[in-house]
Amino acid sequence: MERKGRLMKAIVYTEYGPPEVLHLKEIAKPTPKAGEVLIKIHATTVTIGDTIMRSLRIPGSRWQRFFARLYLGLRRPKRPILGMEVSGELEAVGKDVTRFKPGDPVIASTFDVGFGGYAEYKCMPQDGMLVKKPANISYGAAAALPGGGMTALRCLRKGHIQPGDHVLIYGASGSVGTYAVQLAKHHFGAHVTGVCSATNLDRVRVLGADRVIDYTQEAFPQNDETYDVVFDAVGKLAASQAKKALKKTGVYLNVHKASGNGEKREDLLFLSALIEAGKLSPAIDRCYPLEQIVEAHRYVDKGHKKGNVIITVIPGGETCSRRSEG
């Protein structure tokens, strides 16, 4: 059957639960209003945040869970299309748009505009979390930049890292962790120790870690080892254990508590510039087509993803080039 011209494919969910609550549906294609652009989405991602919202398994205190549920929807999702980061090209621009033009390749975070990345099209305000895509990475790699990249940057800045400081990153092979290793080493100039499982040791070394620890084989912390900053990039390290590894003036950072203060467009521009300069590279684990979103969520639910999981909305081409891996 031929599709109607004003419809688009999207992955929606109308109840909370396992990956199977996600299903493919045709819905109305959006039209950009004044000051908005219409993104033809090439790629999006499956993040831990997406799986948390889908399942409603919210970490944190009882009050955090309560307010999160108010935002997401008490009985059913208020925002039926997940997807917090996208890359694509602009199909159209609304009236008064001056920053962009049709055809521009872009990266965007949809966190502040009701999500919506699991679809063929998304409207965004031109002054929102939207920047031009660096030319030296694929659309798939670009889609993975906003969430993990900006989270790692916000957290590490709170550590006031100085060149030569010793920084330990726990969960160094995840989305936030892979960015944190690269930023700590190549931007802040730190001596970096990464903690991950045995299967990811080489990957973390390639990203820039001076030392790697296999947490399944090696006790942490060891002896009198201390660090200027300990960053738990996955929120799974006991605070008491982390603080044992700190110097007297050291800083302990937990991704769940240190990643607040909201997204800033200048941070996304800054990270894009690092990519263009060859100082940062999104790490890609796996790529799935949009139609296999359920399988992608099942994989992320296991809790062992390495870097980022990409969803290709437009198949083929350079959407998920393997050369973009970290």
Image (cartoon, grey):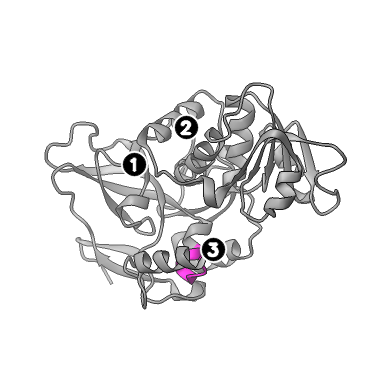
Point out the stretch of residues depicted in magenta.
Answer: 51-60
**Residue 11, visible in the rendered structure:** no
Report the Cα–Cα distance between label 1 and label 2.
13 Å
Q: Quadrant of the N terminus?
A: bottom left
Q: Position of residue 92 (x, y in %)?
A: 21, 44
Tell me which residue sits at (64%, 28%) in the image: 185
The secondary element bearing badge 1 is classed as loop
Residue identified by numbered label 3: 59
The quarter of the displayed image where residue 164 is located = top right
Tell me if 234 is positioned left or right of 30 in this view. Answer: right
Query: Between disc 3 and disc 1, whose residue precedes?
Result: 3
Report the Cα–Cα distance between label 3 and label 1.
25 Å
Q: Position of residue 48 (x, y in %)?
A: 53, 58
Residue type of the residue flagged with mark 3: Pro
Tell me if 164 is positioned left or right of 88 in this view. Answer: right
The quarter of the displayed image where residue 250 is located = top right
Residue identified by numbered label 2: 271
- 181 in relation to 27, above or below: above
Q: Position of residue 163 (x, y in %)?
A: 64, 21
Crowd rating for badge 3 (residues with CA inside 10 Å; few <14, some 14–19, many 20+): few
**Mark drawn on residue 129:** 1
Report the Cα–Cα distance between label 2 and label 3.
28 Å
Tell me which residue sits at (66%, 56%) in the image: 236
